[in-house]
């Protein structure tokens, strides 16, 4: 009661003031609001204008001037326009003279003006019906400048930017372009990148827009944490992922960079791994990528729920297509009851069943696996339901995208025709044949589309042509030939007809050649191929002495080859050929010729040249007919990943000419994709040649130049002609006591390879897949194992020069005249036996064979074995191949070589 009285007293003291305040508020409320707003506008001081960054929000605009409601607009005036005409600005708004001015009309006019993005500021005021619209136009962009970008060049960034010179500058576009640039850097894994846009004001209301870019380091994956895995350790699961933790030994890998798409892919890889191991309930609960505070690295954390491991229960096939027996198909299923459940095996089985149906013409067959999960005994029942589908026929074949290549070049590779029953195997084979042409994009696939009826299908070959012409001038260095110069021109799709024409010229220290070639795969549009080659080859053979190559004999071959091929089946073809060669094998007469019998007639001296070389000297003509039977099921002839190829060829020389022999050769290769991206291949070849003429006792029936040779580059780990029979000429020297010593150091021994009449060579190679970056560079590393041998040659008659004098032979010039030393000038020789005074010239010039002995080695079929690693690289300088090989097994006389490379430069 007392407190209530106090409160009442207090109210009594202040009641008068409160009443006055309430009365004033009531009076003020009666004043029109627009009038108050107008008074505030006229009394407020003008805001000072200051430069602002390009991304700063527009300053708050002055409240628009308003007039009492219902006032008629007598005129509208535009103030501040520079580039735009007032009439153009008025066309952007709906306010017109004669309309009634309201606050809503003024607000809508401002919204319309700002929506054009032509103005940085705009205001509307009314002066007794005279409306004034004041605008400040956005500047015009003079140029776009990028600063600080080194990893991404201007030509990659500028196409992504909306702003461009001579456009109107707006802050919204600047913000959008800033976000686009940052997104470009995120795609490269640079999440720490930042972009600061700035403007430089110029005269005539123009600006330069400058994007100051701080690229920052590439964001790596510092650590991958896996939680919830009990049956598999972290290392095994990380091995299944594409993303790898950044470590010093992975500096070449691009998989250590953070990529959100790769993170999602890794979740699928984990799921696939667990499902193949029987964990049907597995799921990734969460996958979180956290950027470290320094924005340099990511830490990825996976939370897994493994679930129980299942086995296959009852597995069966339920075929609704009458042509297929469900019971027999069930018996052929790859999984059996009691095996650990494998989702990948289920997927492969579905694909195989669909392909099987496709081979019988059911293009739209649909196999649906039905699962029944038994929680009690942890088994998974699977029923493959092969749904009923109509037999399908090819209604139409379309070829699209070929601008140069004629339609018939593509169509003739199809193994099905319009009106044929659909066959999935034949369609796949057609895709492989078109891929093998090498005219179109890699991994080409024939598309299948529904036809005009349920039992009709349309096949589309949507090709993307790639260049097939090759013009190359190259210079390079080879470990075999030293410096190489080459020029060639070839068109593999001449005039779009699928023909191949080419010309080439090659020059190196030890070989020179020129060739013209032409081939037609379909003669007169029939499945018959023909080709012709015309060539000239000059080849200098050599041996090694003190790491130096010494020319031994020169072989010049001029000839041509004509060939024709016909298919016997889809995968087997027969190729016949005829070759005519004119060969001339010669030796340097001053070096290797002497008067052996002392009758003034020079001839090849076996002591100086070796009997095997003397036997090869001469001119001869070879008339050769050949036949090859080839089988080829490769998916791509240029870079196969699966399939087989086999060939058996025979050549008979003796249909005319001066050379007679029979040669047989066989080659084979098989390719498998393994381990998800690796390509494993096995290759083998072998041959034998039999001479059909008796060339005398102790002389091989096959000439030296017709035999097989083996070594680099086909047999890695061995030098050129480094495998097989050979003659080593070992010099004899005196030791400190004057006793003869045979020198066996290979650097000081003459080494002449004789070739062999039989050989074999096998290769096992595993091509290792690399990341996308390495693939774009054209890098293809591989590990290999080579096994082979060269053998079966008649043992030659070995020569020797006795110790200590060796053998001296009188020298003759190229015309057979004896050479004498001129007494007046010991450095010169002459063929005149007398001097100017009629005195005989003396002494004779001699070729001297220092003391030596010859050893015959290497004629054995015992295998030579080498292992190593190699890399193919389509470098900017041309094709590059490098091999490191280690020989595990060799025979006496073999020449080994650890490192080999070949490189060329295009210009």
Image (cartoon, helix red, strand yellow):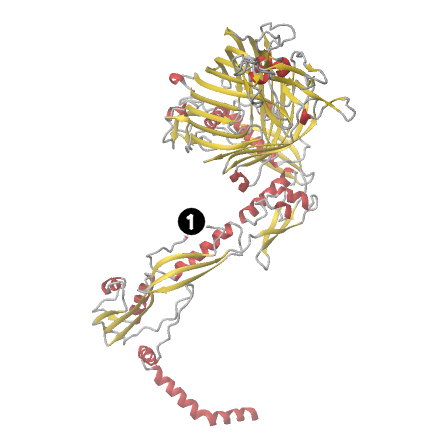
Residue at the image point whose x is 26% and y is 74% from the top: 126
Q: In the image, 545: left or right of 67?
A: right
The quadrant in which residue 141 appears is bottom left
In the rendered image, the vertical position of residue 454 relative to residue 259, given as above or below: above
Q: In the image, 57: left or right of 758?
A: left
- How many numbered marks does the figure carry? 1
In the rendered image, the vertical position of residue 699 relative to residue 804, given as above or below: above
Residue at the image point whose x is 66% and y is 25% from the top: 895
Q: Residues within 10 Å of mark 1 (few under 14, many from 20)?
A: few
Image spot of residue 503 (x, y percent): 43, 24
Image spot of residue 155 (x, y percent): 42, 49
In the rendered image, the vertical position of residue 302 relative to residue 746, given as above or below: below
Can residue 755 be spotted in the picture? no
Residue farthest front in this picture:
837
* Viewer-side residue, 397 vs 431: 431
* Viewer-side residue, 500 vs 832: 832
Residue farthest right in this picture:
737
Image spot of residue 478 (x, y percent): 55, 31
* Viewer-side residue, 830 vs 288: 830
**Residue at mark 1:** 155
In the rendered image, the vertical position of residue 752 relative to residue 902, given as above or below: above
Image spot of residue 682 (x, y percent): 61, 25
Can residue 529 be spotted in the picture? yes
């Amino acid at each position: 009661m007392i407190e209530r009285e106090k409160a009442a007293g207090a109210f009594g003291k202040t009641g008068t003031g409160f009443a006055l305040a309430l009365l004033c508020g009531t009076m003020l409320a009666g004043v029109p609001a627009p009038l108050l707003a107008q008074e505030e506008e006229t009394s407020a001081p003008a805001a000072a204008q200051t430069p602002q960054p390009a991304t700063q929000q527009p300053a708050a605009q002055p409240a628009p001037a308003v007039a009492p409601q219902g006032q008629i607009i007598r005129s509208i005036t535009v103030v501040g326009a520079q580039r735009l005409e007032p009439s153009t600005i008025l066309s952007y708004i709906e306010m017109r003279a004669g309309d009634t001015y309201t606050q809503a009309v003024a607000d809508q006019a401002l919204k319309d003006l700002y929506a054009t993005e032509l103005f940085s500021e705009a205001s509307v005021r009314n002066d007794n019906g005279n409306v004034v619209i004041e605008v400040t136009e956005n500047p015009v962009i003079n140029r776009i400048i990028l600063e600080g970008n080194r990893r991404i060049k201007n030509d990659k960034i500028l196409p992504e930017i909306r702003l461009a010179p001579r456009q109107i500058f707006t802050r919204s576009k600047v913000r959008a372009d800033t976000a686009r640039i940052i997104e470009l850097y995120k795609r490269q894994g640079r999440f720490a990148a930042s972009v600061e846009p700035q403007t430089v004001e110029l005269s005539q209301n123009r600006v330069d827009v400058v994007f100051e870019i701080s690229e920052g380091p590439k964001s790596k994956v510092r650590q991958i944490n896996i939680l919830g895995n009990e049956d598999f350790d972290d290392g095994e699961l990380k091995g299944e992922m594409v993303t790898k933790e950044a470590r010093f030994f992975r500096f070449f890998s691009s998989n250590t960079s953070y990529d959100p798409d790769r993170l999602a892919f890794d979740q699928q890889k984990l799921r696939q791994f667990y499902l193949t191991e029987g964990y049907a309930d597995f799921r990734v609960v969460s996958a979180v990528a956290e950027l470290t505070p320094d924005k340099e690295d990511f830490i990825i954390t996976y939370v897994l729920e493994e679930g129980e491991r299942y086995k296959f229960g009852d597995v069966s096939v339920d075929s609704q297509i009458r042509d297929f027996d469900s019971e027999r198909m069930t018996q052929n299923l790859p999984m059996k009851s009691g095996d650990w459940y494998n989702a990948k095996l289920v997927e492969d089985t579905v694909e195989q069943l669909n392909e099987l149906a496709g081979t019988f013409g059911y293009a739209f067959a649909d196999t649906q696996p039905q699962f029944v999960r038994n929680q009690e005994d942890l088994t998974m029942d699977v029923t493959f339901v092969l749904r009923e589908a109509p037999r399908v026929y090819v209604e139409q074949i379309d070829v699209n995208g070929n601008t140069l290549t004629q339609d018939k070049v593509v169509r003739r590779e199809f193994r099905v025709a319009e009106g044929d029953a659909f066959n999935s195997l034949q369609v796949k084979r057609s895709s492989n044949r078109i891929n093998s042409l090498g005219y179109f994009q890699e991994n080409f696939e024939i598309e299948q589309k529904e036809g005009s009826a349920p039992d009709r299908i349309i096949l589309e070959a949507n090709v993307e042509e790639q260049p097939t012409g090759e013009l190359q001038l190259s210079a390079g260095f080879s470990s075999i030939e030293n410096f190489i110069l080459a020029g060639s021109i070839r068109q593999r799709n001449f005039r779009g007809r699928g023909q191949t024409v080419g010309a080439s010229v090659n020059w190196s220290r030890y070989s020179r050649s020129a060739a013209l070639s032409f081939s037609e795969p379909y003669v007169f549009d029939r499945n018959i191929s023909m080709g012709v080659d015309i060539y000239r080859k000059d080849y200098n053979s050599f041996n090694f002495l003190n790491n130096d190559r010494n020319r031994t004999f020169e072989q010049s071959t001029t000839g041509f080859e004509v060939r024709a091929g016909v298919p016997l089946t889809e995968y087997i073809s027969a190729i016949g050929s005829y070759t005519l060669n004119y060969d001339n094998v010669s030796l340097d007469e001053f070096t290797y010729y002497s008067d052996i019998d002392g009758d003034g007639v020079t001839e090849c001296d076996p002591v100086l040249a070796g009997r095997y070389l003397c036997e090869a000297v001469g001119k001869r003509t070879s008339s050769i007919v050949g036949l090859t039977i080839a089988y080829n099921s490769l998916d791509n002839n240029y870079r196969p990943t699966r399939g087989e190829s086999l060939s058996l060829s025979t050549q008979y020389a003796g249909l005319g000419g001066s050379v007679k022999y029979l040669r047989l050769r066989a080659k084979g290769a098989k390719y498998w994709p393994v381990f998800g991206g690796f390509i494993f291949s096995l290759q083998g070849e072998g041959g034998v040649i039999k001479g059909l003429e008796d060339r005398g006792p102790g002389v091989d029936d096959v000439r030296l130049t017709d035999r097989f040779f083996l070594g680099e580059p086909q047999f890695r780990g061995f030098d050129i002609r480094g495998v097989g029979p050979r003659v080593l000429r070992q010099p004899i020297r005196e030791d400190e006591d004057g006793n003869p010593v045979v020198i066996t150091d290979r650097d000081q021994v003459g080494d002449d390879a004789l070739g062999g009449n039989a050989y074999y060579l096998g290769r096992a190679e595993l091509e290792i897949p690399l990341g996308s970056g390495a693939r774009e560079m054209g890098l293809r590393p591989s590990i290999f194992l080579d096994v082979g041998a060269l053998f079966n040659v008649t043992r030659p008659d070995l020569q020797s020069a006795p110790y200590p004098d060796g053998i001296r032979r009188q020298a003759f010039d190229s015309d057979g005249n004896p050479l004498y030393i001129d007494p007046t000038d010991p450095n010169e020789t002459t063929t005149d036996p007398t001097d100017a005074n009629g005195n005989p010239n003396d002494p004779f010039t001699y070729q001297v064979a220092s003391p030596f002995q010859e050893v015959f080695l290497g004629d054995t079929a015992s295998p030579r074995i080498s292992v190593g690693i190699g890399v193919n690289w389509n470098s900017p300088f041309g094709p590059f191949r490098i091999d490191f090989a280690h020989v595990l097994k060799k025979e006496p006389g073999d020449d080994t070589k650890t490192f080999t490379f070949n490189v060329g430069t295009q210009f």
